[in-house]
C-alpha cells in the first residue's frame, strides 16, 4: 500500500517536470494567456485590409529595384563610429515603392512614396532603411497599426472604409488625425526623384567614446519639387511614377543629401506621430546617388527585406516601439512571400508586354 | 573497464548546453509571438546564443569521440537501449543542425548574421528567397521536434533516476551517488555487504526447470 503510494507520488513528481515545461513553453509562445500581437498578427491585419497578394510584399507591394552609391562627407563621423560615415564612396542597392498591398495599384493615389536602401560599409557591415515621403507616421504602436489596418479596410460595395469603424478607431487614436490632416494638406511629389524620404522613426548614433545621440534623418532631393494635382489623381497613368523614374534615370543619375537631425532633450523619441520642431541641429552626412533601376525580376531588391533594424555598429535602435514592430512584421511578410511563387512586378510585366 | 560516468567535460557541457537549448526554445517562441520591443531584444540574444550552442555541441562531440562513455545498465531491454541511443544521436543532430539551419536561413534571406557589435558571421548559403522560406519553416519544425525530444529525454532520465534507480541519471551527475558507489559509513567502511539488497533482476523465483 505505502509502496504504491510512494511510486504514485514519484510518478506524479516525474510527470510534473515535463508538464511544467510544456506549460511554460505555451506561455512563452503566447498560446495561453492574454492574446499577443506578433509580427504575423500584424501581417494578418495588413492582409485583411489589402487582400492577399501571394508572392509580393504585404506592404509597399509595387516597387522597382535601384542601384547607386553613397558618398559620405565625413561630417557625421564624429557622431557615429559606423564606418559608412567615414569619407568615402559605398555601394547602395534599394527599392522605390508606393504604399499599399496591391502590386498593380495605380500610382494616382495619395499614399506613401517610399525609398528603401541598403548601404554597405567598407567593413562589409550593412545598413538597411525603409523611408516614406512624409515626416510622421499615422500610428505610434503596433497595436494601433493593426487596429488602423482593420478599421480602414475598403468596403468593396462603397469603395470606402466603413465610416463607423473609422470613427470608432479615431475616437481612441486621436494621433492618427494629425497624420490625416498632414497628408490631406501636404503636396504630393510628382516624381520619386523629387521626394524627401524620412526615417520617421528615431534611431541612436553611437560615437567612438560610446556616447549615443538620438537622431532622425531624411534624404533631401537635388531635383526641384513639383506636385501632383490631387484632384486629378484618377486620370494619372497607371505607372506614372515608375515610368517617370526610368525616364529620369535614362537622362542621368539622381541625387539626395542625407540630413541627420539631432533630437533636443525635450523631443519625443518614442512616438513617430510627433514631428520634431524645426531648428534642431542637423548634419549633412553625405550624398546618395542613384544611377540605374531594374525590374524586381532582375534586380537585387526583391528577395531581401528592408528591415530598418538591420544596422551597422555605430547605429542603434531608439526606444521607438515601431522599430521592433517593423522588424517582426517585415520578417513575417518575408516568411510568407518567400515560399509563394513571386509573380511579375508592375514594371517587369510592362517590359515583357511592351517587348522591351 | 568502462567508466561509471561521462568525462567531466562532457558532463559540464551537457548541463550548460541543456540549459542554453531550453532557454533558446523559449526565447525563440517568445520572440516570434510578439511585435513589442522584446522582439528585437530577444532576436539579438537568439543569434549569438544559438551559435554558442553550435560551438559547444561540436566541442562536446569531439570530446565524446575521444573518451569512453559509461554503459547502459545490463538489464535494460534491448529495444529501450536502442531508443536511448537513437534519441541521443537525434539530440546531437538537433544541437548542431538547428543553429546551422538558423545560420543558413539568414544567409539565404540575405540577412547579416550579426552576433554582436562588430561581429558578423559570413553567409553559408547564397541568397535565395525560396531557400530562406523553406529553411524558416524547417527551423520552426525542427525546434518543435527538439522540444518534444527533450521532454522524452528528460522524462526518461527522471525515470532512470527515481523509478529504476539504475545509476543512469548519475552518469551525467556530479555529486557522490549511492547508485554508483558503494555507500560508506562514518568510519569510511563500505556498508555494501551489510545492506544485502537483492538486485532487482534476481528477486523473482526461478521458473521450474
Ligand atoms: C508598425 C509599423 C509598420 C509596419 C507594421 C510596417 C509593415 C511593413 C511590411 C510588412 C512591409 C513589407 C516587408 C517585406 O515583405 O519585405 C513593409 C515595407 C515597407 N515599409 Fe513598413 N511598416 C511600418 C512602418 C513603416 C514606417 C514608419 C515606414 C517609413 C519610415 C515604413 C516604410 C516601408 C517601406 C519603404 C517599405 C518597402 C520596403 C521595400 O521596398 O522592400 N514602414 N512595411
Ligand atoms: C539551438 C539553437 C536554436 C534553437 C533551439 C532555436 C529555436 C528557435 C525557435 C523555437 C524559433 C521560433 C520558431 C517559430 O515559432 O516560428 C526560432 C526562430 C528563429 N531563429 Fe532560432 N533557434 C536556434 C538557433 C538559431 C540560430 C543560430 C539563428 C541564427 C543565427 C537563429 C535564428 C532564428 C530566427 C531569425 C528566427 C525567426 C525570427 C522571426 O521569424 O521573426 N536561430 N528559433
Ligand atoms: C534538462 C533535463 C535533462 C536531463 C535530466 C538529462 C539527463 C541526461 C542523462 C542522465 C544522460 C545520460 C544517459 C546515458 O547514460 O546514456 C543524458 C545524456 C544525453 N543528453 Fe541529456 N538531459 C537533459 C537535457 C538534455 C538536453 C536539453 C539535451 C540537448 C538537446 C541533452 C542531450 C543529451 C545527449 C546528446 C546525451 C547523450 C550523451 C552521450 O551519449 O554522449 N540532454 N542526459
Image (cartoon, rainbow, N blue to C red):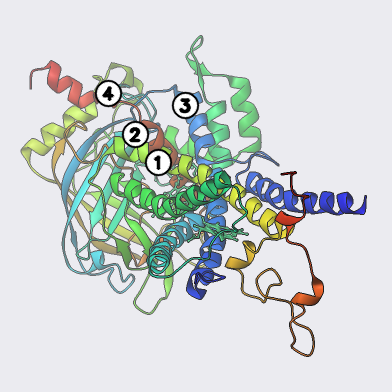
Which residue has dot 1 on it? B136
Label 3 and label 2 in one chain:
yes
Distance from disc 1 to disc 4, alpha carbons, whole Å, reads 21 Å
Place of residue A132 in the rendered image (x, y in percent of width and height, measured from the top left): 36, 42
**Disc 1 beta carbon < 8 A from ligand 2?**
yes
Chain at tag 1: B
C-beta proximity under 8 Å, tags 1 and 2: yes
- The extreme front residue here reads B209
Distance from disc 3 to disc 2, alpha carbons, whole Å, reads 16 Å
**Closer to the camera: disc 1 or disc 4?**
1
Q: Quarter holding the C terminus of chain B?
A: top right
Chain at tag 2: A
At 35% from the left edge and 21% from the top edge, which residue is drawn? A231
Which residue has dot 3 on it? A47
- The extreme top residue here reads A157
Which residue has dot 2 on it? A338
- The extreme right residue here reads A1
Distance from disc 3 to disc 4, alpha carbons, whole Å, reads 17 Å
Place of residue A316 in the rendered image (x, y in percent of width and height, measured from the top left): 41, 62
Amino acid at each position: 500500500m505505502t509502496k504504491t503510494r510512494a511510486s504514485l507520488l514519484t510518478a506524479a513528481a516525474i510527470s510534473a517536470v515535463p508538464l511544467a515545461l510544456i506549460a511554460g513553453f505555451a506561455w512563452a509562445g503566447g498560446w495561453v494567456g492574454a492574446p499577443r500581437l506578433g509580427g504575423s498578427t500584424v501581417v494578418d491585419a495588413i492582409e485583411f485590409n489589402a487582400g492577399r497578394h501571394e508572392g509580393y510584399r504585404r506592404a509597399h507591394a509595387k516597387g522597382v529595384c535601384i542601384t547607386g552609391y553613397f558618398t559620405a562627407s565625413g561630417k557625421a563621423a564624429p557622431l557615429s563610429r559606423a564606418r559608412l560615415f567615414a569619407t568615402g564612396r559605398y555601394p547602395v542597392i534599394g527599392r522605390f515603392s508606393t504604399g499599399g498591398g496591391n502590386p498593380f495599384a495605380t500610382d494616382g493615389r495619395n499614399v506613401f512614396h517610399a525609398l528603401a536602401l541598403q548601404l554597405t560599409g567598407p567593413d562589409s557591415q550593412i545598413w538597411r532603411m525603409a523611408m516614406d515621403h512624409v515626416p510622421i507616421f499615422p500610428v505610434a504602436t503596433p497595436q494601433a497599426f493593426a487596429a488602423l489596418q482593420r478599421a480602414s479596410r475598403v468596403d468593396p460595395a462603397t469603395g470606402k472604409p466603413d465610416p463607423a469603424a473609422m470613427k470608432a478607431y479615431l475616437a481612441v487614436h486621436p494621433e492618427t488625425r494629425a497624420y490625416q490632416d498632414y497628408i490631406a494638406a501636404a503636396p504630393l511629389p510628382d516624381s520619386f526623384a523629387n521626394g524627401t524620404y524620412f526615417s520617421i522613426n528615431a534611431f541612436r548614433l553611437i560615437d567612438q567614446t560610446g556616447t549615443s545621440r538620438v537622431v532622425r534623418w531624411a534624404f533631401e532631393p537635388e531635383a526641384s519639387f513639383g506636385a501632383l494635382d490631387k484632384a486629378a489623381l484618377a486620370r494619372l497613368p497607371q505607372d506614372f511614377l515608375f515610368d517617370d523614374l526610368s525616364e529620369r534615370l535614362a537622362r542621368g543619375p539622381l541625387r539626395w543629401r542625407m540630413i541627420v537631425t539631432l533630437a533636443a532633450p525635450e523631443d519625443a523619441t518614442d512616438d513617430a506621430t510627433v514631428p520634431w520642431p524645426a531648428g534642431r541641429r542637423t548634419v549633412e552626412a553625405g550624398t546618395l546617388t542613384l544611377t540605374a533601376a531594374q525590374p524586381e525580376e532582375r534586380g537585387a531588391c526583391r528577395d531581401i527585406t528592408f528591415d530598418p533594424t538591420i544596422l551597422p555598429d555605430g547605429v542603434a535602435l531608439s526606444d521607438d516601439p515601431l522599430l521592433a514592430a517593423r522588424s517582426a512584421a517585415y520578417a513575417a511578410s518575408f516568411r510568407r512571400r518567400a515560399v509563394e511563387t513571386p509573380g511579375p512586378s508592375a514594371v517587369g510585366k510592362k517590359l515583357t508586354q511592351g517587348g522591351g | 573497464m568502462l567508466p561509471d560516468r561521462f568525462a567531466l567535460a562532457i558532463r559540464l557541457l551537457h548541463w550548460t548546453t541543456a540549459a542554453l537549448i531550453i532557454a533558446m526554445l523559449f526565447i525563440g517562441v517568445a520572440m516570434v509571438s510578439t511585435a513589442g520591443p522584446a522582439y528585437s531584444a530577444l532576436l539579438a540574444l537568439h543569434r549569438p546564443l544559438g551559435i554558442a550552442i553550435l560551438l559547444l555541441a561540436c566541442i562536446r562531440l569531439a570530446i565524446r569521440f575521444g573518451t569512453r562513455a559509461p554503459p547502459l545498465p545490463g538489464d535494460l531491454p534491448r529495444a529501450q537501449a536502442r531508443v536511448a541511443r537513437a534519441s541521443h544521436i537525434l539530440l546531437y543532430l538537433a544541437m548542431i543542425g538547428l543553429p546551422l539551419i538558423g545560420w543558413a536561413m539568414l544567409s539565404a534571406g540575405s540577412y547579416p548574421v550579426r552576433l554582436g557589435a562588430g561581429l558578423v558571421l559570413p553567409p553559408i548559403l547564397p541568397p535565395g528567397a525560396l531557400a530562406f522560406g523553406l529553411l524558416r519553416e524547417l527551423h520552426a519544425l525542427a525546434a518543435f521536434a527538439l522540444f518534444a525530444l527533450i521532454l522524452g529525454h528528460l522524462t526518461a532520465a527522471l525515470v532512470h533516476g527515481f523509478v529504476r534507480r539504475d545509476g543512469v541519471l548519475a552518469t551525467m551527475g556530479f555529486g557522490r551517488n549511492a547508485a554508483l558507489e558503494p555507500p560508506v559509513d562514518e568510519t569510511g567502511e563500505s556498508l555494501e555487504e551489510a545492506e544485502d539488497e537483492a538486485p532487482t533482476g534476481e528477486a523473482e523465483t526461478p521458473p521450474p526447470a
